[in-house]
Amino acid sequence: MKNIILLVCFAFFACLPPGTAFAAFHTFQPSPNDLYDLDHGKYYQWGINWQVMAGETIVGASLTFDNIRNYNSDPNDLWVHLLDSVSAGTHVGTDNKDGVDQFAGQGILLHHWEDFPSISQDITYDFSAQEIVTFMDYLSDGNFGFGLDPDCHYYNDGISFTVETSAVPIPSEIFLLGSGLLFLAGGRARRSMKKG
């Protein structure tokens, strides 16, 4: 039985290329989840406290709007910024300036959507490699956030932010050493079973 377990373990690790890492996904949602349906007379800050676990690195990030739609067919804008520092939670301010980005000059502008239709759609914004670098810099103190300025009313069924992390790759030398030890252990187990 030990022989079979060792061979299965060896086969599993032998199929993985050196430095293979395993991914984890961390999802965050504001409260309320729809940010009050992104009313056009308001702007929103969503602050998140979080730190990457030791031994992990960020390999992807995406912001998703579920079933977002404009309340009518009028021209509309939605600006979304990544911000360096926002106290945790949801913060709402009054915005009486249509067509003006409330967060201009703050953080980095992730995207400016224009003229969403009145038909529901799912929108996912994937961070670029440079935006991930900036995000990791912002995250160095364990806090970051988003600034959202809707210049129209956007009904939606929820907003979420997902971060994909990966374990820091195992150096090839350690992988090879571990594979060799498993191979030797498997060989010893086979010889002892033949003798017995």
Image (cartoon, grey):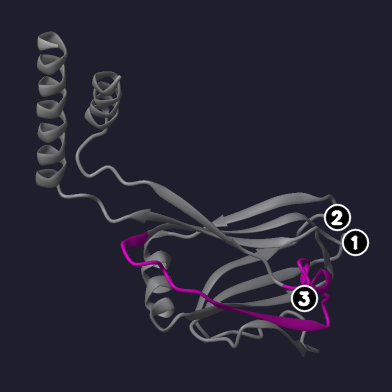
Q: Residue at x 60, y 88 (%)?
A: 87
Tell me whether the residue at label 2 lies in contact with that at label 1, contact meaning CB atoms closer than 8 angstroms.
yes
- The crowd level at tag 2 (other Cα within 10 Å; few <14, some 14-19, many 20+) is some
Q: Which residues are magenta?
A: 31-57
Above or below residue 9? Residue 87 is below
Q: Which residue is mark 2?
A: 118
Find the distance from the CA under tag 2 to the CA under tag 1.
5 Å
Q: Amino acid at mark 2?
A: Ser
Q: Amino acid at mark 1?
A: Asn
Find the distance from the CA under tag 2 to the CA under tag 3.
14 Å
Describe the element under mark 3 as helix, strand or loop: strand
Residue 39 in the magenta stretch? The answer is: yes
Q: Amino acid at mark 3?
A: Asp
Where residue 94 appears, x then y in whole percent?
79, 90
Between disc 2 and disc 3, whose residue precedes? 2
Residue 34 found in image quarter: bottom right
Q: Which residue is mark 3?
A: 151
Where residue 110 appears, x then y in whole percent?
54, 68
Frontmost residue, 35 versus 99: 35
Q: Which residue is mark 1?
A: 72
Describe the element under mark 1 as helix, strand or loop: loop
Between disc 2 and disc 1, whose residue precedes? 1
Q: Is residue 105 left or right of residue 2?
A: right
Describe the element under mark 2 as helix, strand or loop: loop
